[in-house]
Image (spheres, rainbow, N blue to C red):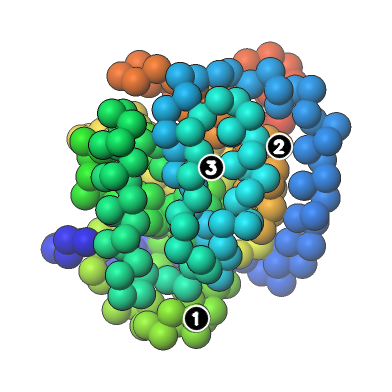
């Protein structure tokens, strides 16, 4: 990955408190809520079946994204995991292997690839899109911390333990807050118990007007298992190439499920 230069210092948002961390225990219920939500999820917009790669979060593997990938596969997309086992950070060869996967997938299909990343996996997705804009169609992230300092999460010590790297030095290699040059959606939750939610907000970008932030009610651990997050992912993937529009809260149900983006 190319090194960034002349970056502004990241904003520091306090990491989620103990109460929000305790709310992470609701994650299994978010997965179970898929069952009563299935009739609605099955009616999600259907796209053109283009290839999609899904990246797991820190210390997670493709097993964690299996429910989401199964749902997207049911909608007709050509779905792949990241195929690198557990995500213990961008250790030697990880990002180069991911870059090769994106390039080879796009070349084999003849289509640009959409990248979906959960937490740290979203950082990979964003940075890969910056390096391979011709091969990436869109980026969707779930609870990904990219606009705050590394201490705006409750996972930075785990990152250092599992990756064997200093996160403070690591983030200096990239301009994480900069938006990728492709349509980008950041899905976040104000009740995230791992990542301070302002750290998942993409600031307006003059060079790329096709960016957005979509709020859902979810835990961090449950974001990739949450029916409302799945709906947003499906809705965003269904957009025709070159015809991006912001996510719309259509109907009374969606206006209740997805908070008003103008609220403070």
Q: Residue at x 48, y 44 (%)?
A: 80
> Contact, CB < 8 Å: mark 3 with mark 2?
no
> Contact, CB < 8 Å: mark 1 with mark 2?
no
Under circle 1, the secondary element is helix
Say if 134 sits above or below 192 in the image. above
Camera-side residue: 27 or 20? 27
Task: Say left or right for 53 vs 190.
Answer: left
Alpha carbons under labels 3 and 1: distance apart:
25 Å
Position of residue 51 measured from the top left corner of the image (x, y, whole percent): 42, 34
Q: Residue furthest left?
A: 5
* Crowd around label 3: few <14 · some 14–19 · many ≥20 (10 Å): many
Q: Residue at x 47, y 24 (%)?
A: 49
* Crowd around label 2: few <14 · some 14–19 · many ≥20 (10 Å): many
Alpha carbons under labels 3 and 2: distance apart:
12 Å
Q: Earlier in the sequence, mark 3 or mark 2?
A: 3
| The N terminus sits in image quarter | bottom left
* Crowd around label 1: few <14 · some 14–19 · many ≥20 (10 Å): some
Q: Earlier in the sequence, mark 3 or mark 1?
A: 1
> Contact, CB < 8 Å: mark 3 with mark 1?
no
Q: Is residue 59 visible?
A: yes
Position of residue 158 measured from the top left corner of the image (x, y, whole percent): 54, 79
Marking on residue 227: 2
Q: Residue at x 64, y 39 (%)?
A: 70
Q: Earlier in the sequence, mark 1 or mark 2?
A: 1
Q: Which residue is mark 1?
A: 162
Marking on residue 187: 3
Q: How many numbered marks appear?
A: 3
């Amino acid at each position: 990955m190319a090194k960034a230069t002349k970056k502004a210092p990241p904003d520091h948002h306090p990491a989620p408190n103990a109460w929000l961390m305790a709310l992470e225990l609701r994650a299994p219920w978010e997965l179970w809520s898929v069952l009563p939500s299935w009739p609605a999820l099955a009616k999600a917009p259907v796209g053109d079946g283009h290839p999609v790669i899904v990246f797991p979060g820190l210390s997670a593997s493709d097993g964690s994204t299996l429910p989401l990938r199964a749902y997207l596969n049911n909608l007709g997309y050509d779905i792949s995991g990241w195929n690198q086992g557990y995500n213990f950070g961008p250790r030697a060869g990880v990002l180069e292997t991911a870059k090769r996967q994106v390039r080879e997938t796009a070349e084999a299909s003849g289509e640009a690839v959409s990248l979906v990343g959960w937490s740290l996996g979203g950082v990979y997705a964003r940075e890969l899109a910056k390096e391979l804009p011709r091969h990436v169609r869109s980026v969707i992230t779930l609870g990904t911390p990219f606009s705050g300092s590394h201490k705006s999460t409750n996972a930075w010590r785990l990152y250092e333990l599992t990756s064997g790297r200093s996160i403070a030095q690591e983030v200096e290699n990239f301009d994480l807050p900069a938006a990728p040059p492709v349509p980008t959606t950041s899905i976040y939750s104000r009740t995230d118990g791992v990542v301070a939610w302002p750290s998942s907000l993409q600031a307006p970008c003059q060079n790329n007007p096709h960016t957005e932030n979509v709020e859902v009610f979810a835990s961090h651990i449950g974001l990739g298992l949450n029916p409302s997050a799945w709906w947003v992912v499906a809705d965003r993937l269904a957009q025709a190439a070159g015809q991006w529009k912001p996510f719309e809260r259509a109907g009374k149900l969606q206006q209740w499920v997805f908070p008003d983006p103008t609220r403070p």
